[in-house]
Amino acid sequence: MKKTVLAIPFILLIFACGESTSNGDKEITIEKDSIIIIEDDLPYDKITFEAPDGVIIHANEYKIDDESPIIVLCHQARFNKFEYDGIAEKLNENGFNCIAIDQRSGGPIASQQNETNLSAKELGKGVDYLDAIQDITAAVNYSADKYNQKVILWGSSYSSTLTLWEGMSNENVKATVSFSPGDYFPEIGSLTDSIVNYSKPFFITCSKAETPETEVILSKVNFGENQVHFKPEGNGHHGSRALWLNQDGGEEYWKAVLDFLNSIN
């Protein structure tokens, strides 16, 4: 990747994990010694596809090739596809294609807008958590068709619950990765009761503080092959941010999730 290095004598405020932000079509990484590296070639392609109700879904595609496994990455509340900036690149390095989507229920991260949220609002569509189900369904079906294979569906916080529901009903889902799920949506059923019948591979984890709640959700499950509840030894974090660059305790999450992904491929 082509890079230009510039020295700057002042401190910049950066978002989220404190490692990177963006400037138009260029990625900017800010190092501790006040050096910025401007990457002229982004590690992803911007893509769009349509939800059943006409909302345009915006996504970043991190593609290795046409044959490697494909992971669809779904963000947590008030976030967008850039929750996976850095995570998707590491997944690429380990042999996985990725499509990180904006769900309509979400928001901006620094200057990066949630474009699907804006699209839904322009059309007068709802942008609550459950409204995002059709975005996830569309992303799964689009990715399965494009790569001609079943997908690994990955969720964070509210979307991790929706991805488990999607995995139960969508034959295009091969396996699910779920960071910090909860029985958040009683109006569509009890996740605790329904996941008992979930026969596909899954990887479920959360922060250490959330582990007792997750254990309740999984209390009725007779774990089968490649069904994993990973309990961190450290405090961890809520959602996929547990894997952000330089995140305290991130190494144990990375080892566990990569072990799972490799076991199903």
Image (cartoon, helix red, strand yellow):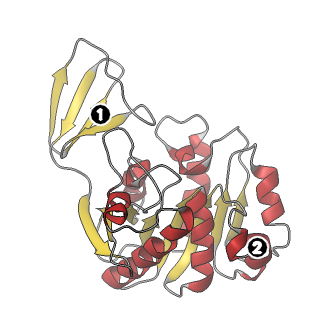
Q: Secondary structure at mark 1?
A: strand
Q: Position of residue 152 (x, y in %)?
A: 50, 72
Residue 259: tell me if it is visible.
Answer: no
Is 217 positioned to the left or the right of 42 in the image?
right
Question: Could you tell me which residue is drawn at 42 percent across and 50 percent down?
Answer: 107
Question: Could you tell me which residue is drawn at 73 percent across and 71 percent down?
Answer: 191
Callout in the foreground (1, 2): 2
Residue 58 sits above or below residue 138 on the image: above
Is 38 in front, or is 136? 136
Q: Position of residue 113 (x, y in %)?
A: 33, 49
Question: Can you name the residue that lies furthest to the top here?
Answer: 9
Specify the label residue 205 is tagged with: none
Question: Could you tell me which residue is drawn at 53 percent across and 88 percent down?
Answer: 171
Is 132 in front, or is 210? 132
Query: What amino acid is found at the position of numbered circle 2 in the picture?
Result: Ser
Task: Classify mark 1: residues with Cα within 10 Å, few (<14), some (14-19) or many (20+).
Answer: some
Query: What amino acid is found at the position of numbered circle 1 in the picture?
Result: Thr
- What residue is pinned by disc 2? 190
Which quadrant of the figure has residue 91? bottom left
Is 40 in front, or is 107? 107
Question: Can you name the residue that lies furthest to the bottom here?
Answer: 171
Which quadrant of the figure has residue 220? bottom right
Q: Position of residue 24 (x, y in %)?
A: 19, 43
Q: CA distance from mark 1 to mark 2?
A: 42 Å
- What residue is pinned by disc 1? 29
